[in-house]
Amino acid sequence: MKKLIYLLLIVIAYSCNKKEANVVKETTSVIEPKNPLNKLKYDNKIDFYCKMDITKYGVSDTTHYKGKLYGFCAKMCKDEFLKNPEMYLAKK
């Protein structure tokens, strides 16, 4: 009986070590989305409409206004900006 218990413990210990080898290690690196818009240089760092930090969370839409390129988190934010861009730029 004792031999059977020792044999079971060895089998359990071996199987635990085997499972550990297949564990994926966690990484601390951040995976950046492959969005070409995020590589452009913008004249704003914060979305004018919703106030989201586009340098941190990325850009999904852009517009040119008076020779400057502005980035926005969404089309809706860009559309709201374009309704009255001077008002948003005055707050800048």
Image (cartoon, rainbow, N blue to C red):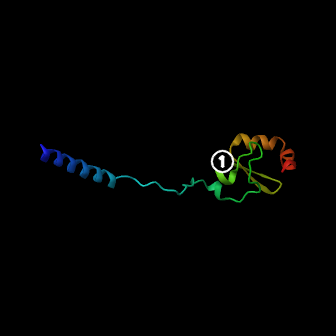
Q: Where residue 69 sits in the image (x, y, percent)? A: 76, 55
Pick the quarter of the image with the N terminus. Answer: top left
Residue 89 falls left or right of residue 79: right
Front-most of residues 20 and 9: 9
**Tag 1 residue:** 60
Q: Where residue 70 sits in the image (x, y, percent)? A: 75, 52
Residue 62 falls left or right of residue 27: right
Circle 1: is it few (<14), some (14-19), or many (20+) Cα within 10 Å? some
Farthest front residue in view: 2
Quadrant position of residue 76: top right
* Element marked by disc 1: loop
Going 71% across and 46% down the picture, which residue do you hit? 52
Residue type, label 1: Ser
Going 85% across and 48% down the picture, which residue do you hit? 91
Front-most of residues 43 and 9: 9
How many labels sit on residues?
1
Q: Where residue 85 sits in the image (x, y, percent)? A: 83, 46
Going 82% across and 40% down the picture, which residue do you hit? 83
Q: Where residue 73 sits in the image (x, y, percent)? A: 68, 46
